[in-house]
Image: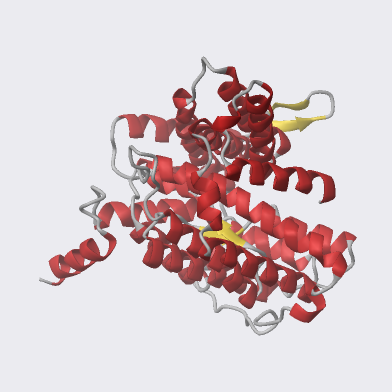
Amino acid sequence: MNEPQTGGLLDRFFKLSAHKTNVRTELIAGMTTFVTMAYIIFVNPNIMADAGIDHGAAFVATCIGAALACFLMGLYANWPVGLAPGMGLNAFFTYTVVGDMGYNWEIALGAVFLSGVLFVILSFWHIREWLLNSIPSSLRFAMGAGVGLFLGIIGLKTAGIVVDSPATLITMGSFTEPSVLLAALCFLMIAVLSHRRVFGAVLISILTVTLIGWGLGLVEYHGIVSMPPSLAPTFLAMDIVGAFDVAMISVILAFLFVNMFDTAGTLMAVAHRANLIREDGYIENMSKALKADSSSSVIGSLVGCPPVTSYVESASGIAAGGRTGLTAVTVGVLFAAAVFLAPLAGMIPAYATAGALIYVAMLMMGGLSQIEWEDQTDMIPAIVTVVMMPLTFSIANGIALGFVTYTVMKVCTGQQSKISAAMYVLCAIFVAKFIFL
């Protein structure tokens, strides 16, 4: 009796039947998303340690900040999105604010807190939702495809399939490397199993490749359980007063803009993949998702995290069938458990998750088919958006350049009526960002 009752309760709360999913699918989707995001548990503490933060405290802060954010997204917004400290934002925190500008990490955390508060204000006043819902459909699809291409570059780079080259900027890696071959194998396994509609294809492939890596001696066993370090060094350690400095205005705005528009691209892409967009273009629970995402940055700063943001890797869980907040809650539980199971979580190699990222990237590129290719004033801005995300290694820059291109082309071809007031506002913000930040 307990299992049906539990399933019924979860069904009613998360509206599983309405989203054509079930508890088992959501749990597997959550595990899949977590596996593709788990690298942040180890990468973020290393970056934050370079800013002078205690490594152990940064590790615990990363896990707790991500877990709380996932719970908020799942329970409040009912979206299948995982959240964690943002890559890129943590590098800006450490190497720009603390390293180049010379502020201590406590003041940098204060700037993160203030940018998060501004983020929440924009979301609760519906300004952010108004801006996003005013985005033309061609740019919406372009953002989803661009995020996919960006994710693909990350996956290819992580796998070693694409490497840097002083002569051509990038070139193909060596397939004589076992890790490269295993990443390619993971991708092909996922593609074949998914085509054959094998349940949990992504997770099965990741775990299989991990086991193969262990058999080849590429994966080391580090144990299963360890007691978590103390969070005391970073808990409520932000210096808000110190962040009220004229020179910190650009830092706060940089955190705000990058977080806002990276999240915009990610949520748009995820909403499309999870079928959360109705035929009339309305995005289900977008307002709640925006509030949950923006509030997460404030929560993260309290425990010692750089801006916490929605992860595009959530698309891997959606590809595994995730459609509701139960997926996000599952991710949150796993992040919380990772505090105690860090050695086990760390056994998943990067090349295994890279294969999943490459596969998901290709799925997300499908949005290109929805672009109006006959109208160059729609097509060219869309291409700029898609191409510039991976080439500048920034979702925010791709969105900015695409929006500016769209507005300029519409104005210069006499189609001003197709430009919303929000588009003009966004373009002004983007231009100011490029000039002053």
Q: Is residue 136 left or right of residue 435?
A: left
The x and y percentages for residue 8 are 17, 65
Q: What coloring was used for the rendering? A: secondary structure
- Residue lying at 55% horizontally and 34% vertically, measured from the top left: 139
The x and y percentages for residue 12 are 21, 64
393 or 373, nearer to the observer: 373
320 or 147, nearer to the observer: 147
- Residue lying at 40% horizontally and 54% vertically, measured from the top left: 80
Question: How many numbered badges does the structure rendering display?
Answer: 0
The answer to whether residue 190 is above or below residue 132 is above
Residue 211 visible in the picture:
no
Q: Is residue 28 left or right of residue 223?
A: left
Q: Residue furthest left?
A: 1
- Residue lying at 55% horizontally and 31% vertically, measured from the top left: 418
The answer to whether residue 378 is above or below residue 323 is above
The answer to whether residue 227 is above or below residue 224 is below
The answer to whether residue 372 is above or below residue 345 is above
Q: Quadrant of the N terminus?
A: bottom left
Q: Is residue 110 left or right of residue 182?
A: right
258 or 225, nearer to the observer: 258
Residue 225 visible in the picture:
yes
Report which quarter residue 351 is drawn in: top right
- Residue lying at 47% horizontally and 50% vertically, measured from the top left: 314
The x and y percentages for residue 307 are 64, 63
Q: Is residue 325 left or right of residue 230?
A: left
The x and y percentages for residue 40 are 60, 58
Q: Residue furthest top?
A: 374
